[in-house]
Image (cartoon, rainbow, N blue to C red):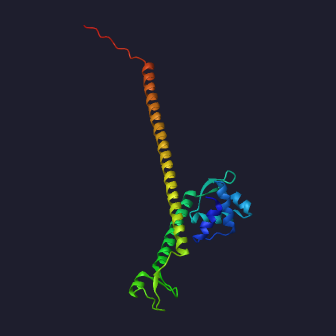
């Protein structure tokens, strides 16, 4: 997900995104594991100021970090930051689902008013039109069913597009999960194989050690006894 899309999404869901945050997101979108020293230098900030901004993004679950001890200052840690792309994908998907729910509700509201007076254009829900024998109580003219409005048609199109996008993203997430699961299985199999080979080497080594010990052992002479 490109940084402009991330920023637009965050703003639309109500997250505060100021100019410095935009710059940081742009930096992290282009490269992973960026030192906060680099962030501070590029934004002309003090280290503590840069770290504070990055911690804010971390509290929003947008970034992750690793830390390493500074080789020059043993008491100091260096932090390396990256976008949490998995979390961002999840936030974006939940955002789209929230949009879908909102627009579906709007469409239901629009569809309530399916009848209209032919004279004064007052709109009615089906129950009210039926109760009034399809006669407008304002002007006495006939109430007729109305064609879908531009708003209804627009909402129907937007809902269709959102459903398609959510389905695509769900399939994409499932593919990513399958790939990760398969990768983990391969790594687990490799690790099991390493452990098995290590055990075999250790068993072989012990067997060779015992063989060598028997080979180098000094035989104990057996005293012969004579019969009296």
Question: Residue 166: x, y in percent?
Answer: 51, 61
- Name, please, the residue furthest toward the left: 228
Name the image quarter holding the N terminus.
bottom right
**Residue 59 placement: quadrant:** bottom right
Left or right of 196 in this view: 37: right
Give coordinates of residue 194: x percent, y percent.
Answer: 48, 37
Viewer-proximal residue, 99 or 25?
99
Q: Which residue is rendered at x = 48% and y = 40% of the image?
A: 191
The quadrant of the picture occupied by the C terminus is top left
Q: Residue at x 44, y 31 (%)?
A: 200
Q: Quadrant of residue 130?
A: bottom left
Residue found at x 62% / y 67%: 8
Residue 208 higher or lower than 81, as above or below: above
Give the x, y percent position of residue 103: 51, 72
In the image, residue 140 above or below residue 9 = below
Out of 61 and 219, give the one closest to the viewer. 61
Q: Position of residue 128 (x, y in %)?
A: 42, 85
Whether residue 76 is visible: no
In the depicted view, which residue is nearer to us: 69 or 176? 176
Instruction: Tell me: residue 212, above or below residue 114.
Output: above
């Amino acid at each position: 997900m490109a940084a402009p899309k991330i920023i637009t999404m965050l703003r639309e869901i109500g997250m505060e995104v100021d100019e410095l945050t935009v710059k940081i997101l742009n930096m992290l979108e282009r490269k992973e594991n960026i030192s906060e020293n680099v962030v501070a230098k590029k934004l002309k900030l003090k280290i503590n100021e840069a770290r504070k901004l990055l911690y804010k993004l971390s509290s929003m679950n947008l970034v992750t970090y690793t830390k390493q001890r500074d080789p020059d200052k043993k008491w100091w840690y260096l932090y390396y930051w990256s976008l949490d792309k998995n979390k961002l994908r999840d936030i974006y998907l939940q955002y789209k689902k929230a949009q879908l729910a909102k627009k579906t509700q709007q469409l239901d509201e629009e569809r309530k008013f399916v009848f209209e007076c032919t004279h004064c254009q007052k709109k009615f829900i089906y129950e009210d039109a039926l109760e009034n024998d399809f006669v407008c109580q304002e002007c006495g003219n006939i109430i007729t069913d109305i064609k879908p409005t531009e708003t209804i048609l627009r909402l129907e199109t937007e809902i269709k597009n959102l459903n398609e996008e959510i389905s695509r993203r769900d399939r994409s997430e499932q593919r990513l999960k399958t790939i990760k699961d398969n990768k983990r299985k391969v790594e687990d199999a490799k690790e099991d194989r390493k452990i098995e080979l290590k055990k075999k080497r250790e068993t072989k080594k012990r067997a060779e050690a015992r063989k060598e010990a028997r080979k180098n052992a000094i035989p104990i002479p057996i005293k012969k006894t004579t019969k009296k």
